[in-house]
Amino acid sequence: MNEFEWRRQLRNLRQPLRPQRDLWTSIEAALADAAPGSPRSPDPSLPRLRPPHRRRWLLAAGLAASVLLVAGIGWHLPHPPAGLPLRVSASPAMPAWKPADPRLAGAAIELDAARMELQQAIRQAPGSAALQRLLARTERQQAQLRRSAEPAG
């Protein structure tokens, strides 16, 4: 079978098909059975739903389990010692640096912007150890970028 035959078969698949039986008669019959005055009989083909109160209990139990899981994870995370002062930055007034290589210049601009945003965030939340770690990582990346630009430039 070549590509032309496949394409012909695909075009034939786009043709509309007529259903094997009329669906509207069964839909109308189901609507007539579910009229407000008639008692509802459960359709055996539909899946059975749990009662609403049981669903609420399952939802509440799932939420409680999620809260316990998050609390357990938070409990086991390492916490910084209480007496340890947090630093804002090793070099708060680090001058903007633009390497000669344009590929490194974009990375230097992004890292400098990230460092400034992290410093602003640390001023708003000085006790955040996560922000301190991010700032230290950003400064390490800046130093690594400067070292990689020295041999190239």
Image (cartoon, rainbow, N blue to C red):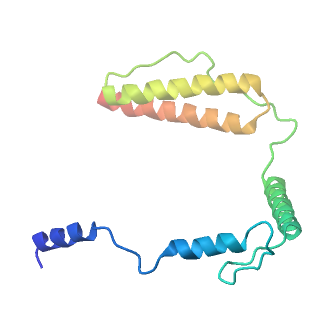
- The quadrant of the picture occupied by the N terminus is bottom left
Which residue is depicted at the point 53% across and 24% down? 113
Which residue is depicted at the point 59% across and 22% down? 116
Which residue is depicted at the point 58% across and 26% down? 115
Q: Quadrant of residue 145?
A: top left
Q: Is residue 107 left or right of residue 52?
A: left
The percent coordinates of residue 87 (x first, y second) are 73, 28
Q: Is residue 146 left or right of residue 28?
A: left
Residue 115: tell me if it is visible.
yes
Q: Image height check: is 141 above or below 108?
A: below
Q: Image height check: is 109 above or below 135?
A: above
Which residue is depicted at the point 51% across and 35% down? 141
The percent coordinates of residue 124 (x first, y second) are 75, 24
Q: Is residue 127 left or right of residue 147?
A: right
- The quadrant of the picture occupied by the C terminus is top left
Residue placed most toward the observer, 8 or 18: 18
